[in-house]
Image (cartoon, rainbow, N blue to C red):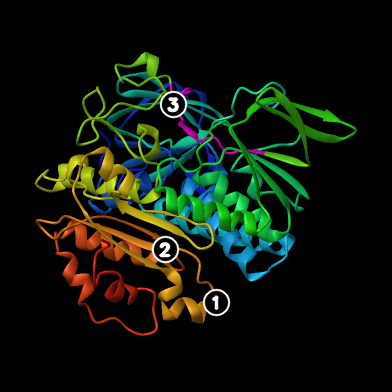
């Protein structure tokens, strides 16, 4: 093993550019590294920084210079929310895109230096591939380098799924959730395939910028995981903003005629063609493991390619862990961050943290107004035969909503009749993405709902609506 202060290479550091200076003889030698992190995502980069602060040696391999810092800051959470915010403020599309690019460049450089400036961290541009349980080959611009890792952390994230619709993958109009945020000009006619949460965020954003948006989905039910009343409100509000929904349809073909794409759908045997300048495939993301060479290891994956892990994120090979989206499940940057905490606790704590004791995890969909949820919905409570008290309040009854000029939505909370503990909450309201964390904290701390009911809140705020929401359950 190399000593902690030792460097793996002589690398000249420039923001966004890394040049590895190697010689053929050096490339042939197998280097042993204390810790290898494959991928620059949230959990992996935080772990790499922490390990370096403990004096340990870390090699971070990232195949794209455009992904320093991971998915969230480059192509997902932050840039998409920046554009959603700009759309709501009335910023024109080109200006919003330029501002987003400047923000991402700043964040990318900051994240790169957060790791590369550590004496015991090497950031290497290249594509990693397992050649054995603890060995990897990294293909760089200057050749291949071989490494053995005493510990290896797989942190390669996920990638967009392109559905098998004839003509879609070959269409010049095709967009993914990544390329949709790199357009230089606003498409006048946008078709979004997929009425899930990602599709709805983009639908609301592009409609707000002024595009004519049509969302197509083969499912008849809209937002099937949500309560019917909430789903109906979300759909109605998006339709009021100009979004057209075509649900329960077969998506048959994508073709190009006279320079414009057409999406052919059919319903009850009746075909229809929807013209589109761009077509956004928003049908989910799949763990990025296909090119990792896992077939050369004992690391098991499921039928979607997700790395199988146990309650402490161990893979089926000792001293190899998986972090974040690559292991499947809920794909959120804050889950990846909590994955770091679990591994940190195993390596440097008492090992008590587990995936199974994470508790209720809040989620937010950044439409307008935001839809935030934690714990059980009414639909889920019914399915589990869970008794509950229902508290419900229309957003129109909240003074701050009048101040914000947005009285759309509803607050719902489910409470256990015996323990008085909160079972879950669905908040479809302005600032819901902020106050849902308060509910999640109360649930994690096992506080009775009366703590939120009787709390003294500042005024006027959305959070003070808990005083009214929790006064009396629905009959």
Q: Residue at x 44, y 26 (%)?
A: 289
Q: Is tag 1's residue or tag 3's residue first in the polypeptide sequence? A: 3
Identify the residue under disc 1. 405
- The residue at the far top in this view is 296
| Label 3 element class | loop
Q: Tell which tag, 1 or 2, sits nearer the viewer.
A: 2
Measure the C-alpha gap from mark 3 to mark 2: 40 Å
Q: Give the residues drawn in magenta, as a range.
A: 280-292
Measure the C-alpha gap from mark 1 to mark 2: 15 Å
Q: Quadrant of the N terminus?
A: top left
Residue 4 seen in the current view: no
Q: Residue at x 49, y 35 (%)?
A: 285
Q: Which of the numbered marks, if any, corresponds to residue 410?
A: 2
Dot 3 alpha-carbon crowd within 10 angstroms: few under 14, some 14 to 19, many 20 or more = many
Near-viewer residue (168 or 154):
168
- The residue at the far front in this view is 475
Dot 2 alpha-carbon crowd within 10 angstroms: few under 14, some 14 to 19, many 20 or more = many
- Residue 343 % position (x, y): 22, 42
- Residue 219 % position (x, y): 53, 33
| Label 1 element class | loop
Q: Residue at x 38, y 66 (%)?
A: 434
Near-viewer residue (386 or 143):
386
Q: Which of the numbered marks, if any, corresponds to residue 289?
A: 3
Q: Is residue 73 above or below residue 283?
A: below
Q: Is tag 1's residue or tag 2's residue first in the polypeptide sequence? A: 1
């Amino acid at each position: 093993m190399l000593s902690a202060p030792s460097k793996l290479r002589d690398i000249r550091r420039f923001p966004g550019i890394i040049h590895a200076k190697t010689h053929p003889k050096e490339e042939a030698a197998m280097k042993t590294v204390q810790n290898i992190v494959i991928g620059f995502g949230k959990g992996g980069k935080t772990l790499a920084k922490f390990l370096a602060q403990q004096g340990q040696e870390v090699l971070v391999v990232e195949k794209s210079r455009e992904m320093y810092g991971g998915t969230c800051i480059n192509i997902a959470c932050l840039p998409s929310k920046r554009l959603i915010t700009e759309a709501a403020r009335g910023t024109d599309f080109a200006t919003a895109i330029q501002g987003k690019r400047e923000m991402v460049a700043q964040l990318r450089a900051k994240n790169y230096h957060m790791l590369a400036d550590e004496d015991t961290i090497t950031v290497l541009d290249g594509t990693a591939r397992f050649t054995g349980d603890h060995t990897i080959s990294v293909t760089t611009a200057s050749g291949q380098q071989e490494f053995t890792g005493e510990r290896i952390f797989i942190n390669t994230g996920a990638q967009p799924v392109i559905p098998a619709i004839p003509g879609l993958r070959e269409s010049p109009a095709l967009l993914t959730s990544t390329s949709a945020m790199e357009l230089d000009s606003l498409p006048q006619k946008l078709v979004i395939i997929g009425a899930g949460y990602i599709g709805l965020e983009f639908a609301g954003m592009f409609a707000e910028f002024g595009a004519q948006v049509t969302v197509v989905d083969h499912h008849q039910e809209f937002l099937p995981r949500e309560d019917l009343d909430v789903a109906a409100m979300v759909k109605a509000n998006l339709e009021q903003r100009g979004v057209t929904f075509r649900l329960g349809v077969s998506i048959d073909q994508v073709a190009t005629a006279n320079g414009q794409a057409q999406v052919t759908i059919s319903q009850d045997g009746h075909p229809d063609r929807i013209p589109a300048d761009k077509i956004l495939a928003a049908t989910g993301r799949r763990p990025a493991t296909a090119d990792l060479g896992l077939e050369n290891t004992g690391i098991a994956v499921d039928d979607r390619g997700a790395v199988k892990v146990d309650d402490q994120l161990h893979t089926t090979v000792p001293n190899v862990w998986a972090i974040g989206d690559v292991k499947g499940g809920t794909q959120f940057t804050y889950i990846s961050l909590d994955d770091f905490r679990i591994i940190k606790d195993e390596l440097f704590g008492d090992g008590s943290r587990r995936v199974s004791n994470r508790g209720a995890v809040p989620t937010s969909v950044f439409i307008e107004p935001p839809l935030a949820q934690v714990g059980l919905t009414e639909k889920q409570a019914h399915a589990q035969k869970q008794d509950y008290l229902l508290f419900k309040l229309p957003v129109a009854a909240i003074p701050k909503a009048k101040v914000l000029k947005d009285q759309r939505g509803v607050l719902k909370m489910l409470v256990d009749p015996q323990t008085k503990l909160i079972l879950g909450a669905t908040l479809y309201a302005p600032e819901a993405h902020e106050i849902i964390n308060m509910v999640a904290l109360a649930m994690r701390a096992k506080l009775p709902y009366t703590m939120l009911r009787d709390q003294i809140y500042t005024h006027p705020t959305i959070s003070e609506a808990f005083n009214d929401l929790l006064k009396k359950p629905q009959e």
